[in-house]
Amino acid sequence: MSIFSLVWSYLKAKPLNTALNIFLLSLGVSVITLLLVVSRQLEERVANNTKGIDLVVGAKGSPLQLILCNIFHIDFPTGNINLREAEKLANHRLVKNAIPLALGDSYMNFRIIGTSQAYAELYQAELQTGDWWKEELEVTLGANVAALSKLQMGSTFESAHGLTKEGHAHEESKYKVVGILKPTGSVIDNLILTQITSVWHVHEEGEEKSNMNQPLSLKLIPGYQLKDSTKEITALLIKYKNPIAAIQLPRLINTQTNMQAASPAFESARLFTILGSAKTVLMGLAYLLVFISALSIFIALYNSLKERKYDLAIMRSMGASRFKLWSSMVLEGISLTFLGTIGGLLLAHLMLFVFIQTIGDKTGLAPFQLYIEEAFLLVGGVLLGLLCSLLPAWQAYRTDIHKVLAGN
Amino acid sequence: MVSVKDLQYTYSKAITTMRFPDFDIQAGEHSLLLGESGGGKTTLLHLIGGLLQSQKGKIELDGVNIAALSAVQLDQFRGKKMGFIFQKNHLINTLTVKQNLLAASFFAGNPADPQRAVEILEELGLADKLNSKVTELSVGQAQRVAIARAVMNKPALILADEPTSALDDKNCEKVISLLLKLANHSWATLLVATHDQRLKERLNRQIELKSTEINRA
């Protein structure tokens, strides 16, 4: 016999009430936790994916779309930009380095990105097996692609036109897997990397056109001689040389070229503001749930006082101090909220896990990563229990045992 | 064992003060506290048991003046020295029979003694009910468990408030016999407040509470 078994016996005596109270609180806490975990991981991933990219340059359109497409690889391209213009920009004195991207095809929903080796270096990607892509139509796979597509070293595949499964297959040219990357926790895990020229090759029919007097050596694509002035790529990822570039370059690009420049930092901040209001609404709902469950626990404890009038008095007659009755009541409240909070934390991580399983893990979210805020939630849960039980516990404390025991 | 002297008690809204007769009870001298209903028997019993604190007069138990004890000391003293039996059993319904007995030790601050719980229940013929829920017991069985609980901590004094008045002759006889038996086994003195005339034959020492109300000064 201990105060815990006493409290437990009271909770067990009303299983439905107890379960409902715990469940209500769990629901509220799980929404809070879910919002916390998801927004934290999103922020981390955004920070990870935009690291080392000061500016994205692409075709005119929505700047947010430009960022979503070329950094996070979730939206469609705004269009193409002329390679010669891009090359001019890459040689600008305020640009430290520029990475070209050519999008257009995919394999099983994984995007094929024509780019340079510098792109992989941006995300500190390392080879798991095999080698980097070197020749045309050679590809190196991101870790997730390798795991989910069942492609192996040496496998060949046809790309589908467009960025979704439905595009028609390019049957005439087959890609060949020459390497697989280690997981990086960034967007590159979900990409198939190749030469820019591979992307052109797949889409071009017949011989390469030549309309330039002198072939041009490119900084963007080392070793390639540009002979066709109409060649296009999708975007450029730019790193500034110095802070002055942040002021001058975007304006220069947006006003003096027919390209568009968008800052990942600015656009993702804008994105979070949009998401932020949705988060606030959900958070408000979650706190409402927590409040209702706290109220329900308070009412349950308060009502139980009437039923337990004799129990409380008899406990006192057996030698229990007033404080012992007080603490048993408080312990009961805290047990409910503690279990509710634990349940909520478990529920949140479980829901995230199920969600990730259902949509297929391309989000890169880690469902079982814990955050320090969850410990704060647990402490908050205990304090909530104390708060709910203070008044009932006070009533228990001041039970008039003589009146109760004489009054039958 | 028990010594009551010049004891008075006034309820906060009452216009009269209750005055109680002086008396002494020796250890082992099982006694009846007789009087009409509403004559202050319960009040006196609660005063002796420390469930109510007297305003005037002296109550000594085992040489301790309980009026001088602090609230917490009184709780502890009550837990160690006294056992209570009421007209209703007042068992804790959410606990089993065994847990109800162990709860008595727990609240008194004594170590759990399951062995003693089993022994007492055997003596009361309830050994097979050890792990039963309280709600599964008959009224008579429940009252016996309440008696078991009262002697669990080997109290020096057992205070019983109308323990038999709701029972028929047969059960009344049974309960008082068990009470006397258990009190003797655990060297406890029994003080029974009752208007039940049937008990007069079993307990020789009788303290009569007469109309003792005086106008408030």
Image (cartoon, grey):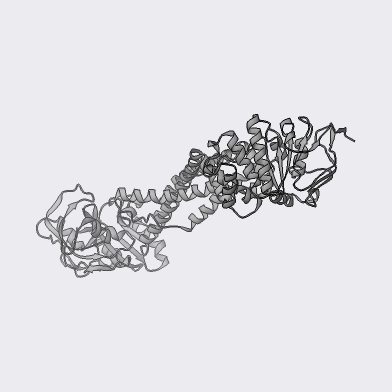
Mark yes or no: residue A384 visible: no
Farthest-out residue, right: B217
Identify which residue, B152 or A118, lies in the foreground: B152
Which residue is pictured at 48% across the width and 38% down the height?
Answer: A16
The percent coordinates of residue A246 (x first, y second) are 40, 62
Residue positioned 74% across, 42% down in the render: B30
Find residue B84 and report its horizontal and vertical position in percent: 68, 42
Q: Nearer the viewer, residue A83 or B188?
A: B188
* Residue A299 located left or right of residue B210: left
Left/right placement of residue A292 relative to residue A70 reads right
- Is the C terminus of chain A in the top left, top right, bottom left or bottom right quadrant? top right
Image label count? 0
The answer to whether residue B11 is left or right of residue A352 is right
Query: A308 or A225, which is in the foreground?
Result: A308
- Height in image: A238 above or below A343? below
Q: Is residue A102 above or below residue A405?
A: below
Q: Is residue B127 above or below residue A98?
A: above
- Rendered view: B173 above or below A319: above
How far across and how far down the image is residue B151, in percent?
65, 46
The location of residue A221, given as percent across then percent down, is: 23, 66
Res. B86 visible in picture: yes
